[in-house]
Amino acid sequence: MAHPRFALSTNTLILASLVIAGMASLLLAVSAGSVSVSWNELWRILLGDRAAPNYTLVTELRIPRALTAFACGGMLALAGALMQVLLRNPLADPYILGVSGGAAVGALSTLLAGLGGLWLTGGAFLGAMLSMLLVFTLAHGRGAWTPTRLLLTGVVVASGWGAIISLILSLSPDTTLRGMIFWLLGDLSQTPHPMLGGIMLGLGLLVALVSARELNVLVFGELKARTLGIGVAGLRLRLYILASLLTAVAITIAGNIGFIGLIVPHLVRMVVSHDHRILLPASALLGASFLVIADTLARSAFPPLQLPVGVMTALIGVPVFLYLLRRSQH
């Protein structure tokens, strides 16, 4: 067993490495694209040189988009780590409780009505909140609130949203169908100010870290957690609300982006640590970098076309995860 001081220094180095990787991914996202920006010009722009040829492109388009991707990736990975503890299910991800389905129905309804912009954002957020309230109310009922009951309720509600999404897509005219499909697969091309996502990610990580020691105990079972004086019901409620809010904000900003919340926490467990004091911030940082790189590839692979970023996260994430899973079995 590693000495505590050694473990702490190792974990600090890991987190520092992930911070550096996150900054590198942001610089790559800002410089790469259909129009390449040299490192020399990028440095001038970052120093405030308005005379640089690509100043507007970098400051008004690429930097906000990269920061938004960073925040959304971090929120989805953090929500996934919390959901996997909350439901005690390794296959749990941010979307398993139907939050994404509710957001999708809200967003697609606004698109079907011919609305966009803030209406789209507001519709997605209201749909996510409605789904969150619905699942919590139905799962709680008059009886005890258990992970199994919450999981089953979430799966059923998500299936219901899926049917409504199919109905909306079937009734939609061809002129709006492409926009709807892009939103469903993840789209960062029309994102609001990145400040919202950054604030939500910071607050979410702070609240999650406060409960990190309790989560370490909850992993070993509800009975042991109660024996050690942990209020399991209150902890679960906090986790549920926090994970749902993180998911709702990420979906509202960037649409449905899969795989990050599922695979990133597992990657961190396999490679870094099971300790939630490290797992939570490491997942947020790795998820953030992952989505930034995926979005950069999505808009750079086939210029001037842009692929849905959700397609790219799946293409990158699945083989990487399968490789690490196979490696861990040896």
Image (spheres, rainbow, N blue to C red):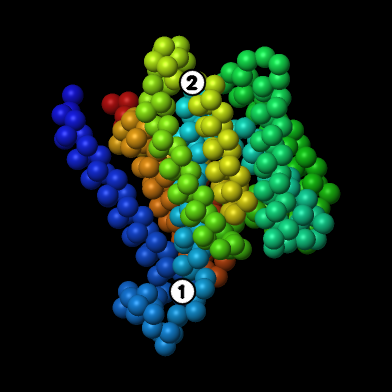
Image position of 301 (left or right of 252): left
Image position of 89 (left or right of 141): left
* Placement of 108 over or under 93, stated as above or below: below
Q: Secondary structure at mark 2?
A: loop
Q: Is residue 8 visible?
A: yes
Residue 310 pos. (x, y %): 55, 50
- Disc sitting over residue 322 in the figure: none
Which of the pair 84/215 is nearer the observer?
215
Image position of 157 (left or right of 232): right
Few, some or many C-alpha atoms within 10 Å of disc 2 (few <14, some 14-19, many ≥20)?
few
Q: What residue is at 19 percent from the left and 30 percent from the top?
A: 4
Q: Is residue 162 visible?
A: no
Quadrant location of the N terminus in the rendered image: top left
Instruction: Tell me which label, 2 or 1, sits earlier in the chain.
Output: 1
* Placement of 316 over or under 26, stated as above or below: above
Which of the pair 235/192 is nearer the observer?
235
Which three-letter amino acid code belongs to the residue tagged 2?
Gly
Residue 288 pos. (x, y %): 43, 50
* Placement of 218 over or under 249, stated as above or below: above
Q: What residue is at 42 percent from the left and 17 percent from the top?
A: 229
Measure the C-alpha gap from mark 2 to mark 1.
48 Å
Residue 330 pos. (x, y %): 28, 26
* Residue of label 1: 58
Q: Secondary structure at mark 1?
A: helix
Quadrant for residue 96, please give it. top right
Q: What residue is at 27 percent from the left and 49 percent from the top?
A: 16
* Residue of label 2: 231
